[in-house]
Amino acid sequence: MTQFTGKVWLLGDDIDTDIIIPTEYLALPGVEDMKKYAFSPLREELAGQIGQGDIIVAGKNFGCGSSREQAPEIIKQLGVRCVIAKSFARIFFRNAINNGLLLIESGGLRDDVAEGDVITVTMGEKIQAGGKDYPITPLPENLMDILNAGGLVKAMQARNGV
Amino acid sequence: MGHTLIEKIVMRNTGEPSVSPGEIKTVKVDRVMIHDIFIPFVVDKFREMGFQKVWDRDKVVLIYDHLVPTSAVEDVRHFKIGDAFVKEQGLEHFHRADGICHQLMPEMGYAKPGNIVFGTDSHTTTYGCVGCFSSGIGYTEMAAVLGTGEMWIRVPETIKVVINGKLPKGVYAKDIILRLIGDLRADGATYKVLEFSGSTVEEMSVSSRMTISNMAIEAGAKAALFAPDEKTCAYSGVKMEDVDWLYADEDASYCQVMEYRAEEMAAVLACPSQVDNIHNVSEMAGTKLDQVFIGSCTNGRLEDLAVAAKILKGKKVAPFVKLIVTPASRSIYQEAVKEGYIRILAEAGAIVTHPGCGLCCGRACGILTDGERVLATNNRNFLGRMGTSKVEIFLGSPATAAASAAAGYITVPEQE
């Protein structure tokens, strides 16, 4: 049973892909160059504060807007262990799984936790925060396969024997 | 239990006798569309995954539109990589300057009724106008589809949208979809399909349906479907008997039903800076404008240019206001020349540009700066979409745009 613990960064509803990485930085050579601008329209200092293993907890419709895949790639590069939100926009959801970024839908958690709280996730089972349990629905098997492979590129490499 | 349009398309594709929302299915992809902005990324990932050849070269369409013609030296790289990939893979379906991808896919018959199509752009929902299940995906996923021809999907729930009656004068398909987005909000249809029906929809041209399916993603929708009819068949070049399986059953199950009377619709605007911030044009009337844009895959078609030409005939664009007109495709451009619309618009003082994404994707053709205000017919008014983040963007119909361009301020189109 995979279990991990991380520090919470709290965000609101409708965090769009232009907030996660503004268009003006998309022409930079790589995700490494872009990541310091993550979330800059909303919280300029946030990208520098997020540490390895931290957890983003957000409201509804996280990742709405364009199909830019740099959005989940950057969040992963910042060291974020997983994003927990009330709901995710569809294209972002697929892009995140394909890049090996774990997403968890939870309706109740966002309104109960505070920034800086430390929470524990038991994969496919529950989130523990402030002495309370929040059940989570396991991801479908085919998505877990992609995540466990480390993303879609690695899954395809395994398929193609690369 | 009956089935919705999306369920029927998935059943037909997979050969399964029945599917239900929530089930994960692997579908065979009928066509993919890759646009210039993401071509280098798709090609990189395709190679990194260890693929050599695309699964079926007839099913791959490459379209250059966001960067046509180039406006920065780095843009050329995208064309070079795209051209090389076309040659290497022996692709026959590519368009280097023929118009916007979402216009060309149904127009050229690449996306047909009952097909399943994926594209690298979020507005791929557009092809639902002809009853095609089409949706946007990221470049990594596109690379995998190019190699395998398959894609997993979760069978979505459907929201049924029924619109009956006759639209008032001065009110168009654009006003309907904006109103709907305002009612659903930006996430109201996330993971879901919008299925349209009713006498208003039946009366509509395929072009008007395209305006509606194009913007479904602004409510988060995975697809927006219209059952094919005679008009669809004429447009897509298919026979009615070949698509007569594609209709929604009366006892199909919907997660939500929304009903509208067309007579109660009004000309509306999406106000800065969310697409679901909807107000009647009359509430905003008199707001001064610096620029008006008529174009995009939402509203750059012949009927849109015809409406604008009718309103602007014999008139002039207001002093100090720029009117930019961008036909959605080369064939629309040619038709608009033939019909005299382009002459009327040029005489009115419009800046008519080549077909392409132009101002809508915020890279060229009329970028604005702090404090400026634009009324545009495209699909997004996010912060910074058409220049700096202090530009105010209003979205409306071509009629509202044309009437406002002549006045120099936001104006309710004539209701006669």
Image (cartoon, rainbow, N blue to C red):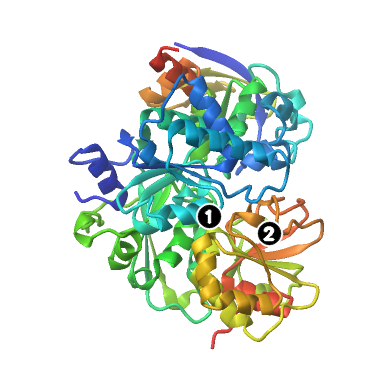
Identified at 53% across, 61% down, the residue is B330
Q: Secondary structure at mark 1?
A: loop
Image-based side of B359 in relation to B194, left or right: right
Residue carrying label 2: B272
Q: Nearer the viewer, residue B283 or B155?
A: B155
Direction bottom: furthest residue: B416
Image-based side of B19 in relation to B389, left or right: left
Residue carrying label 1: B98
Closer to the observer: label 2 or label 1? 1
Between the residue at mark 2 and the residue at mark 1, the CA separation in whole angstroms equals 31 Å
The answer to whether residue B225 is visible is yes
In x, y percent, where is residue B152?
37, 32
* Quadrant of the rendered image containing residue B16: top left
Could you tell which of marks 2 and 1 lies nearer the N-terminus? 1
In x, y percent, where is residue A140?
38, 26
In x, y percent, where is residue B281?
62, 73
